[in-house]
Image (tube, rainbow, N blue to C red):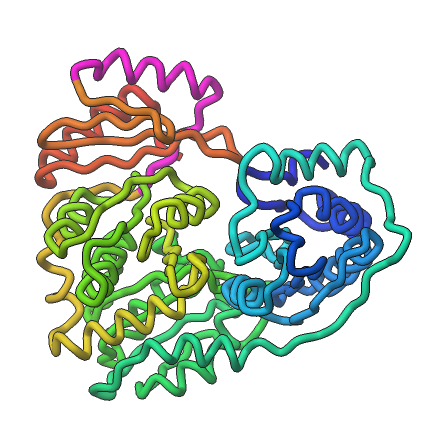
Amino acid sequence: MAGIFKAYDIRGTVPDQLDETMARRIGLAFRTILTEDDLAAGPRVVVGRDMRSHGVGLQKALIQGLTASGLDVIDIGLSTTPMSYFAVGSLGAAGGIQVTASHNPAEYNGLKMSRRGAAPVAGPDGIPLLEKTVLEGSAHPADEPGSVSTAEVFDAYANNVLSHLEEGERLKVVFDAANGMGTIYMPILEKLGIEVVPLYFELDGSFPNHEANPLKYENLEDLCREVRETGAHFGVSFDGDADRAAFVDETGEPIGSDLVTALIAGELLARDPGRAILYDLRSSRALAEYVEEKGGVPVRERVGHTFMKATLRERDGLFGGELAGHYYFEGNYSADCAILAVVEILNLVRRRRQPLSKIVEPLLRYAKSPEINFQVEDKQGRIDALAARYSDGRIDYLDGITVQYDDWWFNVRPSNTEPYLRLVLEAKDEEALAKRRVELEGLLGTPV
């Protein structure tokens, strides 16, 4: 079962990899990774869950383990992951655990964890220490078990999100909840002053309509079609736990999340100039250029929410975004908040009084590939070969290998969970992109 402990969270198939016994053991061990600073305001931990059928039993077992360790649990029930982060911060808890497998298929479940103030659980004293404690069975029950209380956080969370809304034209927006936790955002959406066109707003952890992963184009097809057929101003797709969002413009064309990050950053910098804006290293060069043009300081970071959140705090950053559709806001405990990204894009379209495609157009400066996967057993060996082949480029190893030239660049990074290398490349135009892609595929193999 050690394979369930990932770089950023805990995730596996139920019940063969993750079951209630394991959830109870993880709950018992969780206290060992909380610091004195985390526990300064009291030994309270927020626990929420998504809509997956096995989430109820896993949450119950997790709470049993947490209370056995002496921690008091605040059960917020059915919630999105951003709501869980908000609860940890706003309630002054020592940490939190959300029972969710995010965008993974129905047979998966998992645990996303945070520290006091919704800070990420990162570094060797985070998940690696938790894994060691669980597998060794070295966590023991406290003399006095903790208590369990419940809290309703939706209204406070909704008020926080809506406080950023600017009034304006009544737009039509299509939302695809993918039968995931974005479904519970309907009361917020109805207060945005828009016409809401809902797709798949029935909670169903079997995901009967399509996978709850907006990073795959095939999962956006229904949204794109609905935007075109209804004449909507734009569309939004949430993932399973609603911590990510993908956007499509009024023509039904998906917008890269790096460009959405740039647009939101520009709006926030207009109100708070000179601040740091984080972006993951797979993002278009257009993002960093745009941030500088808007008076911000672009900060490049490796892929992963724990790294993004930690660096956003260290740099006193204003905002950050990842290509996967995570958007991190200083005003939301530096944690992801997909629905707040929706509000900022809505504000932008209302303020500009232009179609979203026209607003994005100035950022379409380069030709860029999607993330391309290659099955590679000797990942490091292939990375070393790339470094030798492109030794005349500007090379760094922030995450895998990035090689930059004046007119093109690429990044190849290893998957944390699969035998894959993932490639992203960008060039000055489509012809140059196609040439470089063929060149790199010759070195990496056939895409999977």
Quarter of image, res 245: bottom left
Determine the residue positioned at 66% across, 47% down: 36
**The N terminus sits in image quarter:** top right
Q: x, y percentage for residue 417?
A: 53, 35
Residue farthest along the right direction in this orientation? 143
Q: Nearer the viewer, residue 284 or 93?
A: 93
Whether residue 421 appears in magenta in the rendering, the answer is no
Query: Residues in magenta?
Result: 371-392
Determine the residue positioned at 26% across, 54% down: 256
Q: x, y percentage for residue 233?
A: 22, 77
Q: Is residue 166 left or right of residue 335?
A: left
Q: x, y percentage for residue 157?
A: 49, 75
Determine the residue positioned at 38% across, 74% down: 175
Q: Is residue 398 left or right of residue 417?
A: left
Asked whether residue 180 is in view, the answer is no
Q: Above or below — where is 191 with respect to 84?
A: below
Q: Nearer the viewer, residue 306 or 432?
A: 306
Q: Above or below — where is 267 with respect to 314?
A: below
Q: Nearer the viewer, residue 38 or 3?
A: 38
Q: x, y percentage for residue 112?
A: 59, 52
Quarter of image, res 199: bottom left
